[in-house]
Amino acid sequence: MIFDLEMAKPREIYNLLIGLVAPRPIALITTMEENGALNAAPFSAYNYLCTDPPIVGIGVANRPADQPVPKDTARNIGRSGEFVINVVTEDIAQQMNICATDFPAGISELEMANLEAAPSAVVKVPRIASAHAALECREHTTLEIGRSRIILGRVVSIYVDDQYVDPGPYIRAEELHAIGRMNGLGSYVRTRDSFLTIPRIPYEQWEKRRGEDPQER
């Protein structure tokens, strides 16, 4: 089946892309309202893009409305220039889903999800206390594209629970149990007991193995 995206409706494009570009990490983003209240919302159009400098990217669409109305997360980042990406793991998956609810203005997602805030190390925006890892970010730039925007954030500090850090430092990802989003039908994927270890092959080793195996010549 071929889908011509020049002819497809925005919702159809959304459904196709989020089902194929998967699994995706989930950024549970905390931002601060103008009155100091804390907002929390999950986004799976998210990934790291480079490490020198450390930059992450988040895609944030407008609210579904006739007029372009940015979501609270985008508005708050544009005003304060700061946000925190809280890593979503199995044990806070249900709370993350509650934070995705389109609550009326004035209702705290953190309160509804029974989540508590904790002070960040560098930025003013707090992280989520029960999140085992969090990336403190400052807005690097925002690119407006149609009814969406790509927000690039520079990571200025990272919090990780001690039990998930090995010397190096390396993250014990097989113990962190992060989850990923798979499509728009409420499907997610666990990483618990599902790791594959596939070491990268040095060229010299690949050449040697190729020379020893006639079928690979």
Image: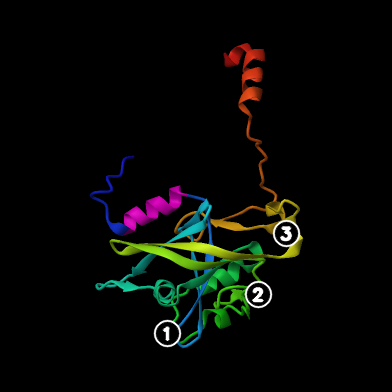
Tell me where residue 131 appears, x and y as whole percent.
Answer: 64, 69
Residue under pointer 1: 105
Most common SS among magenta residues: helix
Q: Amino acid at mark 1?
A: Ala
At 41% from the left and 77% from the top, the residue drawn is 79
The mark that comes first in sequence, 1 or 3, is 1
Spatial CA distance of label 2 from label 3 is: 15 Å
The mark that comes first in sequence, 1 or 2, is 1
| Quarter-of-image position of residue 155 | bottom right
Spatial CA distance of label 1 from label 2 is: 23 Å
At 63% from the left and 34% from the top, the residue drawn is 200
Number of the label disc, if any, that sits on residue 212: none
Secondary structure beneath disc 2? Answer: loop
Seen in the image, is 177 located left or right of residue 99?
Answer: right
Name the one closer to the observer, 74 or 113. Answer: 74
Q: Quadrant of the N terminus?
A: top left
At 44% from the left and 51% from the top, the residue drawn is 19
Residue under pointer 3: 164
Residue under pointer 2: 129
Q: In the displayed image of the protein, which residue is found farthest to the top?
A: 214
Q: Quadrant of the C terminus?
A: top right
Q: Amino acid at mark 2?
A: Ala
Secondary structure beneath disc 1? Answer: loop
Label 1 packing within 10 angstroms: few (<14), some (14-19), many (20+)? few
Q: Is residue 217 visible?
A: yes
213 over 100 or under it: above or below: above
Seen in the image, is 108 located left or right of residue 150?
Answer: right
The mark that comes first in sequence, 2 or 3, is 2
Spatial CA distance of label 1 from label 3 is: 36 Å
Over which residues does the magenta segment extend?
Answer: 11-21
Tell me where residue 154 appears, x and y as whole percent.
Answer: 50, 62
